[in-house]
Amino acid sequence: MNSESCFGPPLRGREEGLIHGMEDELSIVVDEATRHELPVAVHAHGTDGIAAAVRAGVTTIEHCTWMAEGGEFDLREDLAAQIKAQGIYVCTATSPNWRGFAQRVGEERAEHLFSSMRWMAELGVPMIAGTDAGVTRATFDKLVNSLEFYEYLGLTNAKILDMATTDAAQALGVTDTGRLAEGKRADIIAVDGDPLSDLDALRSIRLIVAGGEPVRQ
């Protein structure tokens, strides 16, 4: 984690000190991870933290909320362009309970808070699907809920499915799965319905195949 959590008050001064104090260490982590062919994920809500992660050359940025002092956003197209150019993936780690969150804060406020994620999607920033499972109201068995958030942002179902499979595998350096092709591991699910038309079909799983072996029918 190289910038503040969204659960506390704005800490711009403390965040800047943390970033300046840890940026060298973050670069060392990335260098060592690269030497061992390991990815580096960085948790960053603040724009300063995002910039530090990009300078260090991390693999993925979790949340990537673009927060600034006072709870507003500091959206920087130049920095988004760097993320794209360096092939860094963003996982917004959206809670499966995002609809409940929107109800609690109100639709207008929620739309404002979600706007930075829509902005990244519109700019074509590389994004992968994920959840914030483990925090309050975010469980580990509701991935489809989080996928539907990207649909809310305006992404196509085909792109969302790529984000959850091919793109996610590529982002993490997992080369033997993520797509159907000769020589890959044959990790497959079969569902009732067509998720290209309706993501809800992913909730009706009929078959799970892992490494070519059925594990649930």
Image (cartoon, rainbow, N blue to C red):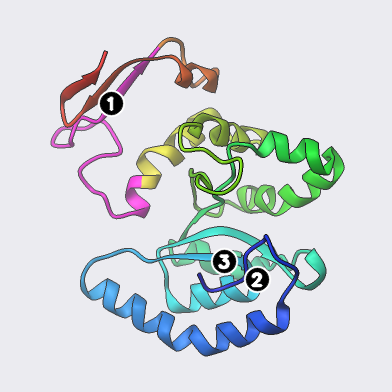
Neighbours of disc 2 within 10 Å: few (<14), some (14-19), many (20+): many
Residue at (75%, 68%) from the top-left corner? 9
Residue at (50%, 47%) from the top-left corner? 134
Q: Position of residue 93 (x, y in %)?
A: 54, 49
Q: CA distance from mark 2 to mark 3?
A: 8 Å
* Quarter where residue 149 is shown: top right
The magenta region covers 169-191
Q: Amino acid at mark 3?
A: Ala
Was residue 182 drawn as part of the magenta stretch in this picture? yes
Instruction: Give the dominant element type of the magenta stretch: helix, strand or loop.
Output: loop
- Callout in the foreground (1, 3): 3
Earlier residue among tags 1 and 3: 3
Q: Which mark is residue 47?
A: 2
Identify residue for label 3: 44
Q: Position of residue 43 (x, y in %)?
A: 52, 64
Q: Secondary structure at mark 1?
A: strand
As rendered, which of 153 and 112 lies closer to the eye? Answer: 112
Q: Amino acid at mark 1?
A: Ile
Residue 15 lies left or right of residue 109; in this view the side is left
